[in-house]
Amino acid sequence: MEDSVESEWTLKSDASSEPFPYCCSACDCSEEPFHANGFQNRAKARSMSMPSAPSSAKFRRTQSLHGPSPVTTFGPKACMLKNPKAVMHIQDPASQRLTWSKPPKSVLIVKKIRDANLLQPFKELCLFLTQQKNMIVYVERKVIEDPAIANESFVSIKNFCTFREDYDDISNCVDFIICLGGDGTLLYASSIFQESVPPVMAFHLGSLGFLTPFNFDTYQSQVTQVIEGNAAIILRSRLEVKVVKEYREKGSVEEMSLVTNGDKTMQYQVLNEVVVDRGPSSYLSNMDLFLDGHLITTVQGDGVIVSTPTGSTAYAVAAGASMIHPNVPAIMITPICPHSLSFRPIVVPAGVELKIMLSCDARNTAWVSLDGRKRQEIAYGDSIAITTSCFPVPSICFRDPVNDWFKSLAQCLHWNVRKKQSHLSSEEEEF
């Protein structure tokens, strides 16, 4: 693969009048950030973790789901204890914008596989980025091996690179990501980057569009705005999941080499949800759910869903949970067909540590899947540890986080209505 000029993205806020920009820790701030539309004088907003002086002035509610930042001093002597290990800083979501420390030079295109309808948009986008924007385009090798694309001559153009999932590390090569397809393409793009994720621009060219706010009709102007740094973003939180498999001696040297300190630990970054279910067994699953080390309940039913706010509009809402805006820092726990009248979907703070294990009286093993992938069996002694990740997915907004979210809800509702009407019409024709 060809090396690209590495660029950094940072968050910027317009909620304060401080003269200096807010850069991420990876940015040395030694040069003036790249701007094209006059955002260089906007500074970061005060986070909830920062102390503030007491004041009798009234706080004006900003256009944010979190409201004004609260005062952290209580009376003349009391204040909130600082946590030196804190990693979460809540910023006004309405003020989050994208900026570049250097002009972006490379882009990863994630395309839905085996979809002939995406061939022409994919071709147009690649030619636009390589010829007009002079950017390096990364594409997964299996996309190029698709029979519908394999014979196309544009694959051999300059600045075109391929990679293989789980073999090639492109985390330091890609400046931003463009997804062509449905929500699944953004989930797949998230799975490629297990740490810091480049900004993601998702075009709605699939069936569902909760996570894909852009239409492809005006892609040239929209991509140009992103390259110039003129875009709002929303940070979609992910779950850090550790699956710990207890070592079971089976007399195999190969198996012993896979474990460390007796156990095998696998770590994943999950954008939508972690689903733990009963698998092929006909028995109800029986799992213990711990929160910060305390046993909360025993889940008896078909399983349990642990989701992010982004995942609340996926499997969780089908199982009876509420829909939560992605800016809300939370984790959702939703039972699947619980054998209980008291266990209902609950929402817990984003920073808690969840742990799921098989109950001692479970009659069968369980199975876990992560964003619908990496499905594996959970046996006695195994555990699943879940918490909010430090590496969110910075999703580029078409307008702003609130309008985009409600627009996606309306579009998906209309899509379901049209699908139902089409189904009824086909039944009437058959009758």
Image: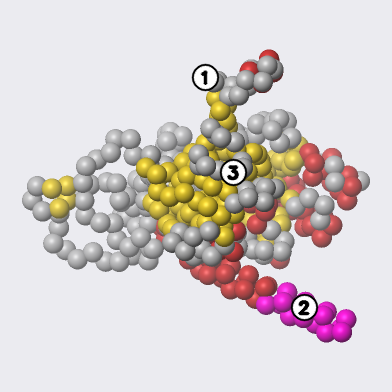
Q: In the rendered picture of this protein, how many numbered marks are placed on residues?
A: 3
Instruction: Tell me the kind of residue under disc 1.
Output: Asn
Magenta part, dominant SS: helix
**Mark 2 or mark 3: whose residue is earlier in sequence:** 3
- Give the residue at x 73% y 35%: 163
Instruction: Tell me the kind of residue under disc 2.
Output: Ser
- Give the residue at x 40% y 53%: 348
Nearer to us in this view, 69 or 134: 69
**Mark 3 or mark 1: whose residue is earlier in sequence:** 1
Gap between marks 1 and 2 measured at Cα: 57 Å
Q: Coloured how? A: secondary structure
- Give the residue at x 40% y 48%: 296
Residue to which mark 2 is pinned:
422
Q: Is residue 412 above or below residue 43?
A: below
Residue 96's x, y, as percent? 44, 55
For label 1, the crowd category at 10 Å Cα-Cα, with few meaning under 14, some 14 to 19 and many 20 or more, is few
Residue to which mark 1 is pinned:
261
- Give the residue at x 9% y 47%: 77
Gap between marks 3 and 1 measured at Cα: 28 Å
> Residue 161 occupies which quadrant of the picture?
top right
Q: Is residue 283 above or below residue 361?
A: below
Question: Which numbered dot is residue 363?
Answer: 3
Quarter of the image where the C terminus is located = bottom right
Marks 2 and 3 in Cβ contact (< 8 Å): no
Q: Nearer the viewer, mark 3 or mark 1?
A: 3
Position of 162 compared to 237: left or right? Answer: right
Position of 253 compared to 323: left or right? Answer: right
